[in-house]
């Protein structure tokens, strides 16, 4: 249920409603707008009648049921778009944010070379996996903490914010120490142990759609993080598995406008994983911007042929710079900046 307060309601009246929501056994999630405050009451839906009676409290304009199964991540709860702050970056605002870097942190020299190259081309954030989820146990699994230290050094050298993946909830403190945005990969989208732990942090979370997950399931996964009090969530369409074999995955471009309609959270696209083939990354990046993506995640490697993971979908630095130039007209046409 959403409790809509009257415009100009004093803060003490808002706090009285919040206290009453807690007394009824619900978790209040207030959103303070410029004109009015709304409070989501999340909990057992069997007590809706009790919440409806809150309309009699001073300052309450109306109590509205949320029909969507996802309560806090949906647009029924929050009409205005959420902007996630990472340092001085506003994600979900007018600027299209570019995250770029290799799939895996392989060495200090590799990471620093890529970081300087993508920074010069126009990226605002640096990606790189220190812990890698691999289909085969014999594939490169990442450098672990040594990789995180390299990422931190690259951030210090370039000023780029760091995005890296969390694979195990027990490593949350370690990963949080080195990164600015914690990525939840497609394989862990419904790892509820990780999601509930991330809910207790205030770190920004980049939540990727599962390979065989519906949009509703993605938003319900985001709900776990929001319900725990962490509202800094960014969603990412990264391609889903279909019967098609010409590409690694099928980048679901339609998911971008659908999510933008159904949710207030920022939405990124990952055309690298979405296609799995480097020559399709740029056209899909252009298409994702046209579809309304708030940002892109692009894999970049100085020598893709020798990459320890995902070389086939990685761009060389010069091709990444060309991609940036090619998407600029699409960014401008969308009324945004790069």
Image: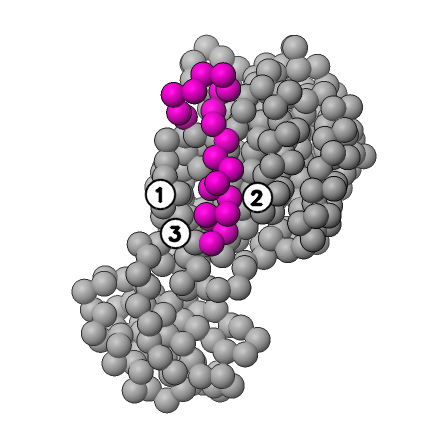
Q: Quadrant of residue 24?
A: bottom left
Query: Distance between the Cα atoms at labels 3 and 1?
Result: 10 Å
**Label 3's element?**
helix
Query: Distance between the Cα atoms at labels 2 and 1?
Result: 21 Å
User: Which residue is drawn at the image coordinates 23% and 70% (left, top)?
Assistant: 48
Mark 3 crowdedness (10 Å alpha carbons): few <14, some 14-19, many ≥20 = many
**Label 1's element?**
helix
Mark 2 crowdedness (10 Å alpha carbons): few <14, some 14-19, many ≥20 = some
Mark 1 crowdedness (10 Å alpha carbons): few <14, some 14-19, many ≥20 = some
The quarter of the rendered structure image containing the N terminus is: bottom left
The answer to whether the residues at label 2 and label 1 have Cβ atoms under 8 Å apart is no
Residue under label 1: 217
Q: Which residues are magenta?
A: 241-261
**Label 2's element?**
helix
* Render colour scheme: one colour
Q: Which labelled disc corresponds to residue 291?
A: 2
Residue 272 appears in the figure: yes
User: Which residue is drawn at the image coordinates 31% and 78% (left, top)?
Assistant: 20
Left or right: 41, with 13 as reference point:
left
The answer to whether the residues at label 3 and label 1 have Cβ atoms under 8 Å apart is no
Left or right: 300, with 40 as reference point:
right
Residue 41 percent coordinates (x, y):
33, 67
User: Which residue is drawn at the image coordinates 39% and 51% (left, top)?
Assistant: 223
Residue under label 3: 223
- Front: mark 3 or 1: 1
* Residue 259 inside the magenta-drawn segment: yes
Q: Quadrant of residue 26?
A: bottom left
Query: Distance between the Cα atoms at labels 2 and 3?
Result: 24 Å
Q: Earlier in the sequence, mark 2 or mark 1?
A: 1
Instruction: Farthest residue to the left: give it.
Output: 46
């Amino acid at each position: 249920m959403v409790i809509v307060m009257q415009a100009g309601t004093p803060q003490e009246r808002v706090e009285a409603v919040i206290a009453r929501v807690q007394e009824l056994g619900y978790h209040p999630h207030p959103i303070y707008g410029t004109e009015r405050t709304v409070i989501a009451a999340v909990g057992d839906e069997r007590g809706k009648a009790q919440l409806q009676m809150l309309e009699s409290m001073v300052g309450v304009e109306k109590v509205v049921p949320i029909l969507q199964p996802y309560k806090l991540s949906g647009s029924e709860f929050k009409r205005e778009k959420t902007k996630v702050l990472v340092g001085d970056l506003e994600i979900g605002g007018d600027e299209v944010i570019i995250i770029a870097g290799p799939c895996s942190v392989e060495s200090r020299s590799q990471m620093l070379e890529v970081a300087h190259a993508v920074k010069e081309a126009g990226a605002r954030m640096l990606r790189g996996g220190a812990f890698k989820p691999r289909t085969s146990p014999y594939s490169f699994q990442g450098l672990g903490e040594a990789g995180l230290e390299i990422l931190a050094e690259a951030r210090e050298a370039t000023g780029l914010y760091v995005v890296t993946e969390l694979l195990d909830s027990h490593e949350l403190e370690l990963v949080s120490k080195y990164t600015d945005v914690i990525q939840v990969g497609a394989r862990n989208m419904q790892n509820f142990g990780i999601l509930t732990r991330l809910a207790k942090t205030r770190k920004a979370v980049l939540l990727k759609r599962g390979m065989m997950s519906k949009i509703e399931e993605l938003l319900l996964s985001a709900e776990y993080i929001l319900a725990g009090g962490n509202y800094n969530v960014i969603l990412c369409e990264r391609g889903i598995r279909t019967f098609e074999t010409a590409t690694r995955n099928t980048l679901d471009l339609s998911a971008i406008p659908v999510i933008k309609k159904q949710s207030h959270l920022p939405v990124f696209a990952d055309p690298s994983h979405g296609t799995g083939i480097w020559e399709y990354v740029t056209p899909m990046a252009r298409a994702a911007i046209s579809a309304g993506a708030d940002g892109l995640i692009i894999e970049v490697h100085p020598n893709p042929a020798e990459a320890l993971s995902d070389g086939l979908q990685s761009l060389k630095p010069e091709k990444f710079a060309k991609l940036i130039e090619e998407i600029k007209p699409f960014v401008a046409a969308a009324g945004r900046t790069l």
